[in-house]
């Protein structure tokens, strides 16, 4: 199948290649997964009209209407039911390509089209009859040598995929469908192919009918079985018209050159349209730019030799060059507008860091150094005597050089409600819940001559306790003998469990509820006191220059003071599981909301090999990329059809950094000698490397929506984050297991969380890590200051090293064991059968 070459290209021989290239760019620019098939139908409805109009000087308008708009039912049926031919192959290929593009976002392998078509032409002995007579030798070689063309394609594929070949494999179906189309169109009558041949201009009507029928069928399949998203009418119109112009101009171009111009033009459109600001490195940007210019060179080389004006096609290089230069200018302007913090003026974060360092110094200084002082400090803080075994705990802490002796306020806050019950009541509650079906709790006790923890579950295999038994035995070491007889309930789920009103008297009752996959806000905040003092007034965020830099960790984690959190976190919008225990049941857990009563312990994830820090995978600060890194799965909530998944915390973060919504970003800038907050659409992608690697925990339709919405990549090793200076960490379904790996590294963690953990009182924000608010309004300015100013970089390195040192001083396994030891001492007192209600 081919269009005959004319003897003279005519005065518009270069105009049509130019229109074809521009239409290819427009097709890429307007591309939308939901619009692919509807626009394909529109394209093939318009195309016959374009050809009829171009032939209008020889055809009466009545004939045009008869041939295009007045096709008889018999002719339509004949066109659809004709035997296998080139028409059918092209129509199916066109529809399949549109369908694949609607299902798979990546187009990374499309640059492989030209060499594949070239190989097929050679194999099928296709006479392309291109006229390369006076082309430069280099460009001619790119066209005539499959090897060189393949090398160029490989470079373009790597550039388009950003080196992530694995995740780009989803573009292969589009590649194969278009390959079928272009090879079929390349066939001449001398080909050995069994496909029928015809002139595409003469067959445009039956081809349009078949392509439309195939596209309609695939659209119905997609709507019925995959998902039913509908695009905007404007998008369909723009994309459909662009596609029809692309086909029309390409067909006219092939009157004078070979069909190889079609895949080359397609590649140029794909490579030329790129958001340079979103690319994570200058290397990626330059690779895109170079690949698009080289594909344009291929397109120019394919034009016939006597088209003297073909060199004007180089003006199309402005399509990628202008956005690239504008991006560079935008970045330079953004940097130059930043206040000169290095000239002596303190950035607001400098003040936060200095205050936090002083707080940390005072905390370390005030720790008890003798048992008598520790005992007295316990009484001062909590108003009661320490639990039995406290002196042995103190001696164990001192012998292991624990830097923290007194900072256990959160622990006592979670234990104190149980002191209002008698020991018998507590034990009775624990026994009742153990006997309750679907409690999803492990019961652990210390037994044997040399007591070790033994854990069991009503239904689960003891070997599949998610390392709870191992955690207890490894961390507690040889102190198990002092814990004989103590029994604990442990939550093995990611999500928190216990909900009780913290200021009411326990009544000894409880209720189990599973409210998974629905809004949980009213449940977890049901006991927020209505007349509680306004903590936002007492402990505000630092609003210097109207940016919410975090100054008080407790305040930003208090659900009762932040009604806006209802629509900002996956666990509050639609958790995968939330098996609430409503009542005063002492349950150990790894993380909890401020309104919940789980007794916090170190997570078993922190001793699992997957999450351990490997010094061999880390690099020195000087060798790290000067950017913020995060990748991972979209856990944190379960998205059903219709759920606002874009409000889940991980999705909000990735969307924020990938610039996927029309929003403003806030920075501090100089204006007439003053520092003010300014809004900008600018977010420098060179400073961020953030992507989802897996889309899960969603219904098929919402998973598909998220894959279309986000820029994803394939899995990366855990050590990949350690090659960046700044590393982000945030909640998943529960606490983040990777936090300690980041803290122990030479990188600086930026932490966003609503879940309290056991270490909160010993890790100080702005000393060991950077806290980020749920709204993230301050994040762009924080990242800019830490990466783009001399003092900010100094502070970033200072905090990274301080966090690393403190990890090896206060977050050691022995420190986790000391904390767990103290938890069990407190629980031992709570469970004492001789203790009456309200007694200590």
Image: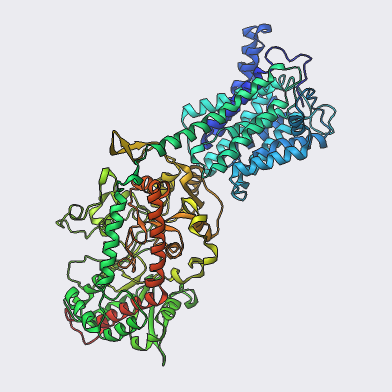
Q: Is residue 273 visible?
A: yes
Residue 742 placement, left or right of 303: left
Name the side, left or right, on which 367 lies relative to 37.
Answer: left
Furthest toward the front, the residue is 343
Residue 295 vs residue 173, the one in the foreground: 295
Which quadrant, please, contains the N terminus? top right
Viewer-closest of 50 and 792: 792
Which image quarter holds the C terminus?
Answer: bottom left
The image position of residue 790, as x and y in percent, is: 40, 49
Image coordinates of residue 292 in percent, x first then y, are 62, 33
- The foreground one among 271 and 362 is 362
Question: Is 324 rendered above or below residue 48?
Answer: below
- Residue 20, image x, y percentages: 63, 24
Up/down of 283 relative to 302, above or below: below
Q: Which color scheme does this rendered protein use?
A: rainbow
Closer to us: 43 or 364: 364
Residue 410: x percent and y percent?
A: 27, 69
């Amino acid at each position: 199948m081919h269009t005959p070459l004319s003897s003279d290209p005519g005065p518009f021989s270069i105009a049509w290649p130019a229109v074809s290239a521009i239409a290819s760019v427009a097709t890429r620019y307007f591309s939308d997964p939901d619009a692919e098939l509807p626009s394909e139908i529109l394209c093939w409805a318009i195309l016959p009209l374009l050809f009829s109009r171009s032939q209008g000087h020889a055809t009466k308008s009545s004939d045009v209407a008869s041939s295009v708009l007045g096709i008889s039912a018999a002719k339509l049926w004949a066109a659809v039911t004709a035997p296998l031919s080139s028409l059918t192959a092209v129509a199916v290929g066109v529809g399949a390509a549109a369908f694949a593009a609607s299902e798979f976002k990546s187009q990374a392998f499309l640059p492989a089209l030209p060499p594949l078509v070239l190989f097929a032409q050679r194999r099928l002995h296709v006479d392309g009859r291109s006229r390369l007579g006076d082309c430069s030798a280099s460009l001619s070689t790119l066209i005539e040598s499959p090897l060189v063309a393949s090398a160029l394609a490989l470079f373009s594929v790597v550039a388009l995929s950003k080196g992530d070949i694995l995740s780009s494999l989803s573009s292969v179906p589009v590649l194969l469908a278009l390959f079928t189309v272009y090879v079929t169109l390349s066939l001449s009558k001398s080909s050995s192919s069994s496909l029928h041949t015809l002139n595409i201009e003469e067959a445009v009507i039956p081809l349009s009918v078949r392509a439309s029928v195939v596209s309609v069928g695939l659209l119905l399949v997609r709507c019925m079985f995959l998902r039913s998203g509908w695009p905007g009418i404007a998008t369909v119109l723009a994309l459909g018209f662009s596609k029809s112009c692309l086909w029309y101009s390409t067909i006219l171009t092939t009157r004078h050159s070979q069909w190889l111009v079609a895949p080359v033009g397609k590649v140029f459109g794909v490579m030329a349209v790129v958001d340079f600001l979103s690319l994570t490195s200058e290397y990626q940007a330059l690779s895109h730019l170079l690949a698009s210019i080289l594909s344009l060179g291929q397109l120019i080389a394919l034009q016939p030799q006597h088209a003297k004006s073909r060199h004007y096609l180089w003006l199309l290089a402005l399509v990628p060059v202008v956005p690239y230069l504008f991006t560079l200018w935008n970045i330079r302007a953004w940097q130059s507008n930043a206040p000169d913090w290095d000239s002596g003026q303190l950035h607001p974060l400098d003040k936060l860091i200095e205050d936090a360092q002083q707080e940390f110094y005072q905390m370390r200084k005030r720790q008890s150094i003798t048992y008598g002082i520790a005992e007295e400090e316990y009484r001062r803080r909590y108003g009661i005597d320490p639990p039995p075994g406290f002196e042995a705990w103190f001696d164990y802490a001192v012998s292991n050089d624990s830097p923290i002796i007194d900072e256990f306020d959160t622990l006592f806050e979670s234990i104190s409600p149980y002191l209002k019950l008698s020991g018998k009541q507590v034990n009775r509650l624990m026994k009742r819940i153990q006997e309750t079906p679907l409690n999803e709790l492990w019961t652990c006790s210390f037994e044997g001559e040399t007591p070790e923890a033994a854990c069991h579950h009503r239904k689960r295999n003891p070997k599949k306790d998610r390392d709870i038994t191992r955690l207890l035995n490894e961390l507690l070491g040889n102190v198990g003998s002092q814990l004989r007889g103590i029994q604990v309930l442990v939550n093995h789920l990611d999500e928190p469990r216990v909900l009780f009103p913290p200021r009411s008297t326990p009544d000894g009752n409880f209720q189990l509820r599973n409210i998974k996959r629905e809004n949980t806000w009213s449940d977890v905040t049901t006991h927020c006191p209505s007349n509680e003092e306004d903590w936002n007034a007492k402990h505000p965020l630092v609003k210097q220059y109207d940016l919410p830099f975090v100054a008080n960790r407790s305040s930003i984690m208090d659900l009762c003071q932040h009604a806006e959190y209802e629509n900002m976190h996956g666990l509050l919008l639609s958790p995968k599981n939330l098996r609430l225990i409503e009542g005063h049941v002492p349950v150990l857990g790894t993380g909890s909301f401020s309104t919940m009563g789980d007794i916090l312990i170190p997570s078993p994830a922190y001793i699992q090999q997957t999450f351990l820090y490997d010094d061999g995978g880390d690099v020195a600060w000087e060798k790290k990329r000067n950017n913020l890194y995060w990748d991972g799965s979209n856990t944190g909530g379960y998205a059903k059809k219709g759920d606002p998944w874009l409000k889940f915390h991980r999705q909000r973060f990735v969307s924020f950094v990938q610039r996927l919504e029309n929003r403003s970003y806030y920075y501090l800038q100089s204006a007439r000698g003053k520092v003010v907050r300014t809004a900008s659409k600018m977010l420098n992608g060179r400073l961020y490397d953030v992507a989802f690697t897996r889309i899960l925990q969603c219904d098929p339709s919402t998973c598909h929506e998220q894959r279309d919405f986000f820029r994803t990549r394939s899995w990366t090793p855990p050590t990949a984050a350690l090659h960046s200076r700044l590393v982000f960490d945030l909640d998943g379904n529960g606490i983040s297991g990777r936090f300690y790996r980041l803290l122990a590294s030479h990188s600086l963690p930026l932490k966003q969380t609503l879940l309290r953990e056991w270490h909160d009182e010993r890790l100080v924000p702005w000393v060991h890590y950077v806290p980020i608010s749920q709204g993230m309004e301050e994040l762009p300015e924080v990242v800019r200051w830490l990466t783009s100013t001399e003092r900010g970089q100094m502070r970033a390195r200072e905090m990274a090293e301080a966090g690393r040192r403190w990890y090896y001083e206060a977050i050691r396994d022995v420190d986790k064991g000391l904390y767990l030891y103290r938890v069990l001492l407190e629980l031992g007192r709570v469970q004492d059968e001789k203790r009456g209600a309200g007694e200590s």
